[in-house]
């Protein structure tokens, strides 16, 4: 019995199952259909091409596995069920499949599924591609319109598509990708030429990423700087998907390149403005602290002197006047202490004069007296001096962390540790209090972070550092900061 073609009404026998030889990448990018399965909501989305391919209206997309299997040839039902187990275990799949479109016939397609995991490694969604290995019953060949639509989409989204031939070691570029790379339409890009244009600092990392993924027949993604013919540097997000032949060997790689240089430049400008804002805020606090100390403080000191002269002028027998005078002197003393403390907290002059270790020890001594919390400070003797921005940032973060210990933790002890190793400065504040609530989801803590935590994280980000916070109910909280001592501009990672 001859095998039915895709347009024959015989639905009792599928086209050849499994790997049948030949080229397994799509012959035309306009043929590629996409789908997505959100495991949290159990919602399935199909692209319009896939709906057309199977003769299904978007509103009639099968909501569950058993409904979907009605569109699959019976001989492939077990394979689909195995695909679900494979994808839920965190592994991708790729093979041929035979559909039974609503318009009739049997349709052979090549399909791929890729799991998407959250930070904990749990699969939360699945994305996939498929394309017909023979002309679809409902697709027809509107390739010219589809190609035009794809070209317009690439231009609007500023991305381009490519296919790399493993045998020839050359890549075929879409028209818009050729334009993005300053190449002539229809030009091919050799492997050596492409890698020569990747920024030297990024090249080893992305070569390893792409090479390992291709060897393991897995999709890959990386971000790299690309140097154009004129020396201009663009920032590219590259995604690739190996195409496997009948022997299980990758014979080509298809993918896209997304240019997000404009976004990078905008983020860089925002980063610069944020740094200026932080510097301006710190400078303003320094000025206000100086003004409080030199102006308000001196005025209060003069008030105390005047009150002292007043004591000498009052008659000894006027007890009421002397009692009021003593109260006024006490109030003046309190005001002087509060102004001095406020001035020092806004910007301790010791931070500029003696450095971070001395300023922290001074602050911790006052904090312990005011709060009743015992604080141990561990700072190496050879810690040394660092830039004004770094020392101010660490001081403010320790200040905010200790304030949180006093307000929220209930801990009666805290520990501060500073260190420096391998060009990095580290600071850690630990308490043994109630800790933060357990995270409600993988996205973060159960409650949104407070303004203080956001401020600490933003300060560290401005200095290209790393901010970490570890906490668990009943096990205390640790705030950790790592800052590069020599802050050189860093490329994308």
Image: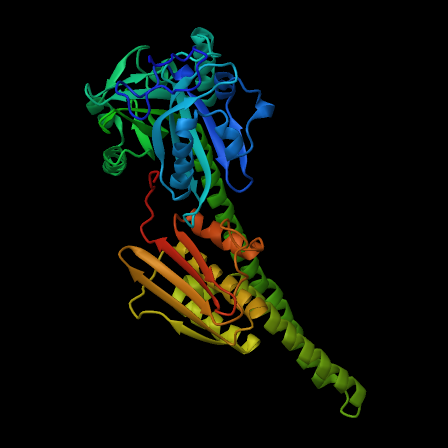
Displayed quadrant of residue 93: top left
Q: Give the answer, above or below, for where 10 lies relative to 395.
A: above
Q: Residue at x 34, y 41 (%)?
A: 489
- Please state the horizontal and vertical placement of residue 104, each as a whole percent of the image: 49, 14
Location of residue 75 with respect to 444 vertically, above or below: above
Q: Is residue 247 above or below residue 316?
A: above
| Side of 194 where 339 appears, left or right | right
**Residue at image x 63%, y 77%?**
333
Give 27 or 403, whichever is nearer the viewer: 27
Q: Residue furthest bottom?
A: 317
In the rendered image, residue 420, in percent from the top left (x then y), is placed at: 31, 61
Residue 150 location in percent, x, y? 44, 15
The colouring scheme, among rainbow, by chain, secondary structure or one colour, is rainbow
Residue 50 screen position, x and y as percent: 48, 21
Left or right of residue 448: residue 204: left
Depth order, front residue of 332/484:
484
| Residue 428 falls left or right of residue 407 | left
Which quadrant is the C terminus positioned in?
top left
- Quadrant of the snapshot with the N terminus: top left
Q: Nearer the viewer, residue 81 or 416?
A: 81
Please count the marks in the image: 0
Residue 174 can be seen, yes or no: yes
- Identify the residue at horizontal 53%, vertical 30% (top origin): 67
């Amino acid at each position: 019995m001859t095998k039915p073609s895709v347009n024959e009404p015989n639905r009792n026998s599928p086209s050849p199952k499994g790997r049948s030889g030949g080229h397994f990448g799509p012959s035309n990018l306009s043929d590629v259909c996409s789908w997505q399965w959100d495991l949290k909501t159990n919602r399935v989305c199909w692209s319009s091409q896939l709906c057309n391919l199977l003769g299904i209206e978007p509103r009639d997309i099968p909501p569950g596995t058993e409904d979907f299997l009605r569109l699959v040839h019976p001989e492939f039902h077990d394979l689909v069920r195995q695909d679900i187990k494979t994808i839920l275990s965190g592994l991708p799949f790729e093979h041929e499949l035979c559909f039974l479109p609503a318009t009739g016939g049997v349709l052979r397609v090549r399909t791929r599924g890729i799991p998407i995991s959250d930070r904990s490694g749990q699969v939360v969604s699945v994305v996939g591609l498929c394309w017909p290995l023979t002309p679809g019953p409902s697709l027809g060949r509107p390739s010219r319109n589809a190609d035009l639509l794809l070209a317009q989409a690439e231009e609007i989204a500023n991305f381009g598509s490519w296919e790399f031939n493993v045998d020839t070691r050359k890549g075929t570029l879409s028209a818009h990708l050729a334009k993005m790379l300053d190449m002539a339409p229809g030009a091919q890009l050799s492997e050596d030429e492409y890698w020569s244009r990747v920024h030297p600092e990024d090249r080893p990392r992305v070569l390893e990423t792409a090479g390992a993924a291709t060897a393991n027949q897995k999709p890959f993604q990386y971000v790299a700087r690309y140097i154009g013919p004129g020396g201009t540097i663009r920032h590219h997000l590259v995604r690739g998907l190996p195409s496997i032949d009948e022997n299980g060997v990758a014979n080509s790689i298809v993918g896209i390149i997304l240019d997000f240089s404009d976004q990078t430049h905008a983020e860089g400008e925002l980063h610069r403005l944020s740094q200026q804002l932080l510097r301006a805020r710190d400078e303003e606090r320094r000025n206000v602290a100086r003004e409080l100390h030199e102006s308000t403080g001196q005025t209060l000191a003069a008030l105390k002197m005047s009150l002292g002269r007043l004591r000498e002028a009052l008659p000894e027998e006027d007890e009421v006047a002397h009692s009021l005078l003593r109260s006024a002197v006490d109030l003046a003393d309190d005001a002087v202490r509060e102004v001095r403390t406020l001035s020092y907290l806004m910007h301790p002059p010791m931070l500029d004069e003696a450095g971070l270790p001395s300023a922290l020890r001074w602050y911790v001594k006052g904090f312990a007296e005011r709060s009743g919390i015992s604080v141990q400070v561990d700072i190496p003797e050879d810690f040394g001096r660092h830039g004004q921005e770094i020392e101010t940032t660490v001081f403010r973060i320790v200040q905010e962390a200790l304030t949180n210990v006093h307000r929220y933790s209930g801990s009666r002890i805290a520990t501060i540790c500073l260190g420096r190793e391998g060009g990095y400065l580290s600071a850690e504040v630990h308490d043994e209090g109630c800790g933060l609530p357990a995270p409600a989801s993988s996205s973060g803590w159960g409650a949104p972070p407070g303004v203080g935590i956001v401020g600490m994280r933003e300060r560290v980000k401005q200095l290209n550092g790393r901010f970490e916070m570890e906490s668990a109910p009943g096990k205390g909280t640790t705030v950790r900061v790592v800052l590069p001592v020599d802050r050189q501009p860093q490329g994308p990672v």
